[in-house]
Image (spheres, rainbow, N blue to C red):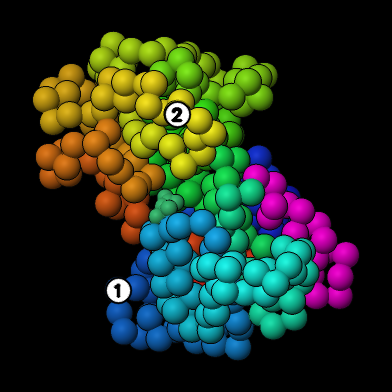
Amino acid sequence: MGEVWTHPRHILSSSQFERPWLEYVFKLTNEIRKYNRTKEGLLYLAALLPHRRIMLYFTQPSTRTFLSFHSACQILGAKVSEVRDASVSSEKKGESIEDSLRTFSSYVDLIIMRSPVAGLCDRIAAMLDQTPRSIPIINAGSGPDEHPTQALLDLYTLSRSFLEQGGIDDKHICFVGDLKRGRTVRSLALMLTQFQRIKMTFVSPERFAISGDLRAKMMACPNVEIYETCELKDILPHADAIYMTRLQDEYDVGEESKAVDYSKYSLKYRDLSCLQQDCVILHPMPRRDELDPAIDFDPRARYWRQERNGMWIRVALLTILLGVDHHILMPEL
Ligand code: CP
Protein backbone atom coordinates (compact mmCIF):
# COMPACT_ATOMS: atom_id res chain seq x y z
CA MET A 1 0.00 0.00 0.00
CA GLY A 2 2.99 2.28 0.32
CA GLU A 3 2.02 3.84 3.69
CA VAL A 4 4.03 3.06 6.82
CA TRP A 5 1.75 1.73 9.56
CA THR A 6 1.78 -0.99 12.15
CA HIS A 7 -0.92 -3.28 13.45
CA PRO A 8 -2.41 -2.40 16.83
CA ARG A 9 -1.58 -4.63 19.77
CA HIS A 10 -5.13 -4.34 21.15
CA ILE A 11 -8.49 -3.24 19.72
CA LEU A 12 -9.84 -0.81 22.31
CA SER A 13 -11.28 2.26 20.62
CA SER A 14 -12.31 3.49 17.17
CA SER A 15 -9.97 6.44 17.61
CA GLN A 16 -6.97 4.10 17.32
CA PHE A 17 -7.33 3.58 13.58
CA GLU A 18 -6.39 5.55 10.52
CA ARG A 19 -7.77 5.07 7.04
CA PRO A 20 -4.92 2.97 5.53
CA TRP A 21 -5.29 0.41 8.31
CA LEU A 22 -9.09 0.34 7.89
CA GLU A 23 -8.63 -0.27 4.18
CA TYR A 24 -6.16 -3.05 4.94
CA VAL A 25 -8.72 -4.77 7.21
CA PHE A 26 -11.41 -4.52 4.53
CA LYS A 27 -9.09 -5.96 1.88
CA LEU A 28 -8.10 -8.77 4.24
CA THR A 29 -11.77 -9.49 5.00
CA ASN A 30 -12.60 -9.67 1.28
CA GLU A 31 -9.77 -12.18 0.80
CA ILE A 32 -10.92 -14.29 3.76
CA ARG A 33 -14.42 -14.49 2.28
CA LYS A 34 -12.97 -16.03 -0.89
CA TYR A 35 -11.68 -18.96 1.20
CA ASN A 36 -15.24 -19.51 2.40
CA ARG A 37 -16.28 -20.56 -1.12
CA THR A 38 -14.65 -23.99 -1.07
CA LYS A 39 -14.07 -26.85 1.35
CA GLU A 40 -10.32 -26.55 0.73
CA GLY A 41 -10.48 -22.84 1.53
CA LEU A 42 -12.33 -23.44 4.78
CA LEU A 43 -9.87 -26.17 5.80
CA TYR A 44 -7.02 -23.74 5.04
CA LEU A 45 -8.58 -21.12 7.36
CA ALA A 46 -9.18 -23.74 10.07
CA ALA A 47 -5.48 -24.67 9.98
CA LEU A 48 -4.33 -21.11 10.82
CA LEU A 49 -4.94 -21.02 14.60
CA PRO A 50 -5.47 -24.56 16.01
CA HIS A 51 -2.50 -23.91 18.34
CA ARG A 52 -4.17 -20.82 19.89
CA ARG A 53 -6.67 -20.40 22.76
CA ILE A 54 -9.12 -17.49 22.91
CA MET A 55 -11.24 -16.35 25.87
CA LEU A 56 -14.67 -14.76 25.50
CA TYR A 57 -15.36 -12.78 28.68
CA PHE A 58 -18.87 -11.36 28.25
CA THR A 59 -20.45 -9.97 31.42
CA GLN A 60 -23.15 -8.02 29.56
CA PRO A 61 -25.80 -9.67 27.35
CA SER A 62 -24.89 -10.29 23.72
CA THR A 63 -26.14 -12.43 20.85
CA ARG A 64 -24.35 -11.44 17.66
CA THR A 65 -21.04 -10.10 18.99
CA PHE A 66 -20.57 -13.20 21.13
CA LEU A 67 -21.64 -15.68 18.47
CA SER A 68 -19.82 -13.98 15.60
CA PHE A 69 -16.57 -13.93 17.58
CA HIS A 70 -17.19 -17.54 18.64
CA SER A 71 -17.79 -18.50 15.01
CA ALA A 72 -14.71 -16.53 13.92
CA CYS A 73 -12.62 -18.57 16.38
CA GLN A 74 -14.12 -21.79 15.00
CA ILE A 75 -13.44 -20.72 11.40
CA LEU A 76 -9.75 -20.26 12.30
CA GLY A 77 -9.57 -23.49 14.30
CA ALA A 78 -8.81 -21.71 17.59
CA LYS A 79 -9.96 -23.20 20.89
CA VAL A 80 -12.48 -21.10 22.82
CA SER A 81 -13.27 -20.73 26.51
CA GLU A 82 -15.91 -18.43 27.93
CA VAL A 83 -17.24 -16.64 30.99
CA ARG A 84 -20.67 -15.11 30.42
CA ASP A 85 -21.67 -14.62 34.02
CA ALA A 86 -19.20 -13.20 36.56
CA SER A 87 -21.36 -14.62 39.37
CA VAL A 88 -20.10 -18.12 38.54
CA SER A 89 -16.44 -17.04 38.59
CA SER A 90 -14.33 -16.20 41.62
CA GLU A 91 -15.41 -12.56 41.25
CA LYS A 92 -18.38 -13.77 43.32
CA LYS A 93 -15.87 -14.46 46.13
CA GLY A 94 -14.54 -10.91 45.93
CA GLU A 95 -11.75 -11.34 43.40
CA SER A 96 -11.03 -8.08 41.60
CA ILE A 97 -11.70 -7.80 37.87
CA GLU A 98 -7.98 -7.11 37.35
CA ASP A 99 -7.01 -10.35 39.12
CA SER A 100 -9.66 -12.28 37.17
CA LEU A 101 -8.42 -11.02 33.82
CA ARG A 102 -4.78 -11.55 34.79
CA THR A 103 -5.72 -15.13 35.68
CA PHE A 104 -7.35 -15.65 32.27
CA SER A 105 -4.20 -14.32 30.62
CA SER A 106 -2.30 -17.23 32.20
CA TYR A 107 -4.37 -19.69 30.21
CA VAL A 108 -5.19 -18.08 26.86
CA ASP A 109 -3.55 -16.14 24.01
CA LEU A 110 -6.20 -13.41 23.49
CA ILE A 111 -9.18 -12.07 25.46
CA ILE A 112 -12.35 -10.66 23.91
CA MET A 113 -14.24 -8.59 26.50
CA ARG A 114 -17.72 -7.17 26.78
CA SER A 115 -18.48 -5.30 29.97
CA PRO A 116 -20.94 -2.69 31.24
CA VAL A 117 -17.97 -0.67 32.55
CA ALA A 118 -16.68 2.12 30.29
CA GLY A 119 -12.90 2.12 29.94
CA LEU A 120 -12.42 -1.29 31.56
CA CYS A 121 -10.76 -2.83 28.48
CA ASP A 122 -8.23 0.00 28.32
CA ARG A 123 -7.42 -0.47 32.01
CA ILE A 124 -6.97 -4.24 31.62
CA ALA A 125 -4.85 -3.87 28.48
CA ALA A 126 -2.59 -1.33 30.23
CA MET A 127 -2.30 -3.62 33.26
CA LEU A 128 -1.47 -6.72 31.18
CA ASP A 129 1.08 -4.75 29.14
CA GLN A 130 3.12 -4.50 32.34
CA THR A 131 3.12 -8.26 32.91
CA PRO A 132 5.10 -11.05 31.23
CA ARG A 133 1.79 -12.36 29.75
CA SER A 134 0.81 -9.27 27.79
CA ILE A 135 -1.81 -10.75 25.48
CA PRO A 136 -4.09 -8.84 23.05
CA ILE A 137 -7.42 -7.51 24.34
CA ILE A 138 -10.41 -6.84 22.09
CA ASN A 139 -13.13 -4.47 23.27
CA ALA A 140 -16.42 -6.14 22.27
CA GLY A 141 -18.52 -3.37 23.85
CA SER A 142 -17.72 -1.28 26.93
CA GLY A 143 -20.84 0.16 28.57
CA PRO A 144 -22.18 3.23 26.76
CA ASP A 145 -18.63 4.06 25.73
CA GLU A 146 -17.33 2.18 22.65
CA HIS A 147 -17.86 -0.84 20.41
CA PRO A 148 -14.97 -0.60 17.93
CA THR A 149 -15.42 -3.97 16.23
CA GLN A 150 -19.06 -3.07 15.54
CA ALA A 151 -17.85 0.19 13.97
CA LEU A 152 -15.44 -1.79 11.78
CA LEU A 153 -18.20 -4.06 10.51
CA ASP A 154 -20.55 -1.09 10.03
CA LEU A 155 -17.92 0.76 8.03
CA TYR A 156 -17.12 -2.37 6.01
CA THR A 157 -20.84 -2.74 5.20
CA LEU A 158 -21.00 0.90 4.13
CA SER A 159 -17.88 0.55 1.98
CA ARG A 160 -19.35 -2.49 0.19
CA SER A 161 -22.73 -0.80 -0.20
CA PHE A 162 -21.15 2.33 -1.73
CA LEU A 163 -18.73 0.45 -4.03
CA GLU A 164 -20.43 1.74 -7.18
CA GLN A 165 -20.83 5.24 -5.80
CA GLY A 166 -17.16 5.95 -5.16
CA GLY A 167 -16.93 4.69 -1.58
CA ILE A 168 -17.65 6.41 1.73
CA ASP A 169 -16.16 9.86 0.94
CA ASP A 170 -18.79 12.60 0.35
CA LYS A 171 -21.61 10.60 1.92
CA HIS A 172 -24.30 11.80 4.29
CA ILE A 173 -24.80 9.38 7.19
CA CYS A 174 -27.82 9.89 9.41
CA PHE A 175 -27.80 8.41 12.95
CA VAL A 176 -31.19 7.96 14.62
CA GLY A 177 -32.27 7.17 18.17
CA ASP A 178 -30.69 7.14 21.61
CA LEU A 179 -27.40 8.66 20.55
CA LYS A 180 -26.25 9.66 24.01
CA ARG A 181 -25.91 6.09 25.26
CA GLY A 182 -25.50 4.21 21.97
CA ARG A 183 -21.88 3.05 21.89
CA THR A 184 -22.11 1.85 18.30
CA VAL A 185 -22.98 5.36 17.14
CA ARG A 186 -20.10 6.85 19.05
CA SER A 187 -17.58 4.34 17.64
CA LEU A 188 -18.83 4.59 14.05
CA ALA A 189 -18.98 8.41 14.11
CA LEU A 190 -15.36 8.49 15.31
CA MET A 191 -14.26 6.08 12.58
CA LEU A 192 -16.06 8.05 9.87
CA THR A 193 -13.84 11.05 10.62
CA GLN A 194 -11.13 9.20 8.67
CA PHE A 195 -13.04 9.86 5.44
CA GLN A 196 -13.35 13.00 3.33
CA ARG A 197 -16.22 15.50 3.18
CA ILE A 198 -18.48 13.41 5.42
CA LYS A 199 -21.82 14.81 6.58
CA MET A 200 -23.32 13.34 9.72
CA THR A 201 -26.81 14.17 10.95
CA PHE A 202 -27.69 13.07 14.48
CA VAL A 203 -31.44 12.66 14.97
CA SER A 204 -32.54 12.07 18.55
CA PRO A 205 -34.83 13.20 21.32
CA GLU A 206 -33.20 16.22 22.96
CA ARG A 207 -32.62 14.21 26.14
CA PHE A 208 -30.62 11.57 24.25
CA ALA A 209 -28.55 13.81 21.95
CA ILE A 210 -24.87 12.94 21.38
CA SER A 211 -22.58 13.65 24.30
CA GLY A 212 -20.66 16.91 24.50
CA ASP A 213 -17.26 15.28 24.09
CA LEU A 214 -18.31 13.47 20.89
CA ARG A 215 -19.81 16.71 19.53
CA ALA A 216 -16.56 18.55 20.28
CA LYS A 217 -14.47 15.85 18.56
CA MET A 218 -16.69 15.97 15.47
CA MET A 219 -16.61 19.75 15.32
CA ALA A 220 -12.82 19.70 15.50
CA CYS A 221 -12.62 17.63 12.28
CA PRO A 222 -12.25 19.84 9.19
CA ASN A 223 -13.42 17.02 6.89
CA VAL A 224 -16.71 16.48 8.77
CA GLU A 225 -19.92 18.55 8.88
CA ILE A 226 -22.38 17.72 11.64
CA TYR A 227 -26.04 18.59 12.11
CA GLU A 228 -28.37 17.78 14.99
CA THR A 229 -32.15 17.64 14.90
CA CYS A 230 -35.15 16.08 16.66
CA GLU A 231 -37.10 15.65 13.39
CA LEU A 232 -36.48 12.42 11.48
CA LYS A 233 -38.95 12.89 8.62
CA ASP A 234 -37.22 16.05 7.33
CA ILE A 235 -33.90 14.31 6.95
CA LEU A 236 -34.97 11.03 5.30
CA PRO A 237 -34.80 12.21 1.64
CA HIS A 238 -31.27 13.58 2.13
CA ALA A 239 -29.52 10.57 3.68
CA ASP A 240 -27.13 8.25 1.82
CA ALA A 241 -27.28 5.92 4.82
CA ILE A 242 -29.57 5.72 7.84
CA TYR A 243 -28.24 4.11 11.00
CA MET A 244 -31.17 3.22 13.27
CA THR A 245 -30.66 2.41 16.97
CA ARG A 246 -32.84 1.26 19.83
CA LEU A 247 -33.51 2.95 23.15
CA GLN A 248 -30.64 2.01 25.50
CA ASP A 249 -32.82 1.89 28.61
CA GLU A 250 -30.52 -0.56 30.39
CA TYR A 251 -28.50 2.56 31.28
CA ASP A 252 -31.44 4.43 32.85
CA VAL A 253 -30.71 5.69 36.33
CA GLY A 254 -34.34 6.76 36.87
CA GLU A 255 -37.31 6.76 34.52
CA GLU A 256 -35.75 8.96 31.81
CA SER A 257 -36.61 6.60 28.94
CA LYS A 258 -40.29 6.59 29.91
CA ALA A 259 -40.42 10.37 29.50
CA VAL A 260 -39.53 10.13 25.78
CA ASP A 261 -41.83 9.47 22.81
CA TYR A 262 -39.45 7.11 20.97
CA SER A 263 -42.02 6.35 18.25
CA LYS A 264 -40.83 9.57 16.53
CA TYR A 265 -37.45 7.86 16.02
CA SER A 266 -38.70 4.82 14.17
CA LEU A 267 -38.55 3.85 10.51
CA LYS A 268 -41.77 2.40 9.09
CA TYR A 269 -42.43 0.65 5.78
CA ARG A 270 -44.38 3.72 4.60
CA ASP A 271 -41.22 5.87 5.08
CA LEU A 272 -39.37 3.92 2.36
CA SER A 273 -41.00 6.08 -0.32
CA CYS A 274 -39.19 9.13 1.15
CA LEU A 275 -35.73 7.54 0.91
CA GLN A 276 -33.28 7.78 -1.96
CA GLN A 277 -33.33 4.76 -4.30
CA ASP A 278 -29.92 3.59 -3.09
CA CYS A 279 -30.06 4.71 0.54
CA VAL A 280 -28.45 2.13 2.86
CA ILE A 281 -30.41 1.17 5.98
CA LEU A 282 -28.30 -0.16 8.86
CA HIS A 283 -29.02 -1.16 12.45
CA PRO A 284 -26.47 -2.69 14.85
CA MET A 285 -29.33 -4.82 16.30
CA PRO A 286 -31.02 -5.98 18.43
CA ARG A 287 -34.04 -3.94 17.36
CA ARG A 288 -37.35 -3.24 19.00
CA ASP A 289 -40.12 -1.19 17.37
CA GLU A 290 -37.84 1.47 15.85
CA LEU A 291 -37.23 -0.58 12.69
CA ASP A 292 -40.29 -2.08 11.02
CA PRO A 293 -39.68 -5.78 10.08
CA ALA A 294 -41.68 -5.10 6.88
CA ILE A 295 -38.57 -3.20 5.67
CA ASP A 296 -36.42 -6.36 5.87
CA PHE A 297 -37.16 -7.38 2.29
CA ASP A 298 -36.43 -4.01 0.71
CA PRO A 299 -33.03 -4.08 -1.09
CA ARG A 300 -31.96 -0.99 0.89
CA ALA A 301 -32.12 -2.96 4.15
CA ARG A 302 -28.54 -4.09 4.81
CA TYR A 303 -28.70 -4.98 8.49
CA TRP A 304 -28.78 -8.76 8.06
CA ARG A 305 -25.75 -8.53 5.78
CA GLN A 306 -24.20 -6.19 8.34
CA GLU A 307 -24.50 -8.94 10.99
CA ARG A 308 -22.86 -11.54 8.77
CA ASN A 309 -20.13 -9.09 7.74
CA GLY A 310 -19.37 -8.88 11.47
CA MET A 311 -18.25 -12.49 11.55
CA TRP A 312 -15.82 -12.00 8.64
CA ILE A 313 -14.42 -8.73 10.00
CA ARG A 314 -13.82 -10.51 13.32
CA VAL A 315 -12.02 -13.38 11.56
CA ALA A 316 -9.77 -10.74 9.98
CA LEU A 317 -9.10 -9.06 13.35
CA LEU A 318 -8.14 -12.35 14.99
CA THR A 319 -5.70 -13.17 12.17
CA ILE A 320 -4.10 -9.72 12.61
CA LEU A 321 -3.80 -9.80 16.40
CA LEU A 322 -2.49 -13.37 16.38
CA GLY A 323 -0.06 -12.70 13.53
CA VAL A 324 -1.35 -14.93 10.72
CA ASP A 325 -2.91 -12.34 8.39
CA HIS A 326 0.04 -12.69 5.97
CA HIS A 327 -1.06 -16.30 5.39
CA ILE A 328 -4.30 -14.90 3.93
CA LEU A 329 -2.79 -12.27 1.68
CA MET A 330 0.30 -14.33 0.72
CA PRO A 331 -0.88 -17.95 1.09
CA GLU A 332 2.34 -19.40 -0.34
CA LEU A 333 4.16 -18.35 2.87
N1 CP B 1 -24.63 -5.25 17.88
C1 CP B 1 -24.42 -5.92 19.02
O1 CP B 1 -23.48 -5.59 19.76
O2 CP B 1 -25.27 -6.94 19.26
P1 CP B 1 -25.23 -7.92 20.51
O3 CP B 1 -25.51 -7.08 21.73
O4 CP B 1 -26.29 -8.95 20.24
O5 CP B 1 -23.85 -8.51 20.58
Write the residue at 69% across / 83% down: 107
Place of residue 23 in the rendered image (x, y in percent of width and height, measured from the top left): 53, 48
**Could you tell me how many numbered marks the image carries?**
2
Precedes in sequence: disc 1 or disc 2: 1
Relative side of 257 to 299, left or right:
right
Residue under label 2: 255
Mark 1 lies on a secondary structure that is loop
In the image, residue 208 above or below residue 142: above
| Amino acid tagged 2 | Glu
Which of the 4 image quarters holds residue 275? top left
Q: Is residue 78 above or below residue 179?
A: below
Q: Which residues are magenta?
A: 118-135
Residue 297: quadrant of the picture: top left
**Residue under the image location 66 percent in, 40 percent down:** 15
Q: Residues within 10 Å of mark 1 (few under 14, many from 20)?
A: few
Q: Give the residue displayed 27% in from the left and 51% down from the top.
A: 304
- Of helix, strand and loop, which one carries label 2? loop
What kind of residue is marked 1?
Arg
Residue of label 1: 37
Depicted 63 relative to depicted 330: above or below: above
